[in-house]
Amino acid sequence: MKQEKWRLGVEENRFPIDLLGKWLKVLLESIDESMDEKTKKEIMEKCGQACAIYHGDIDEIKLIKRKGENLEKILETMNQEELWCGKWIKKGNTITSVCEKCGCPFVRAEIIKPSPAFCYCSRGWVKSVFELVLAKPVKVNLEKAIGRGDEVCQFSIHDID
């Protein structure tokens, strides 16, 4: 009985998800308000790396890579299997992607809304995936971000060869 009082009318099966959303909202607001950019990047990029691992994306990339395909074919397969919110395009020595909607599973499930700090999480996901794809450390640029008020998210990875 007592438990029902603090659910405040939320459906029983949605309660943990709603609570998680509120908890994450406070956490992300606190990160945005009280941490320097370097610390925000470090923390949120690690979260993105964890997402790539625990969401299963890293395992899918490993399977794609086992086929021994070249980079263009790997990107084509990634795009076909929709491992991301936008298409990956290789042009010269750069890979880019533009997402018209946030790619985060928490945002898509309406558990949280994108925020400036939260966008570094996606950067960590991209970094993890492309370090595996390219078998070397990569630098990921987050050029535009919905969580920062832009219309799209835009990522680029340079010096890929």
Image: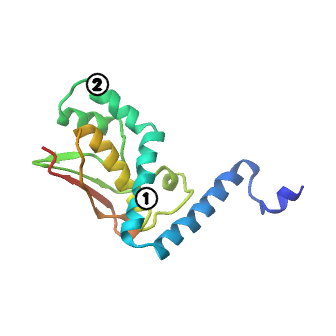
Left or right of 122? Residue 15 is: right
Question: Hey, which quadrant is residue 119 in on the image?
Answer: bottom left
In this picture, residue 86 sits left or right of residue 48 = left
Q: Which amino acid lies under the numbered mark 2 shown in the image of this protein?
A: Arg
Return the residue at label 2: 66
Q: Residue at x 71, y 54 (%)?
A: 15
> In which quadrant is the N terminus drawn?
bottom right
| Residue found at the far bottom of this picture | 33
Locate the C terminus and report the quarter of the image it occupies.
top left
Left or right: 19 with respect to 146?
right
Q: Residue 19 location in percent, x, y?
A: 67, 58
Q: Secondary structure at mark 1?
A: helix
Residue furthest to the right in view is 1
The amino acid on which the numbered mark 1 sits, given as a three-letter code, is Met
Residue 76, compared with residue 84, is above or below; it is: above
Disc 1 marks which residue?
A: 44
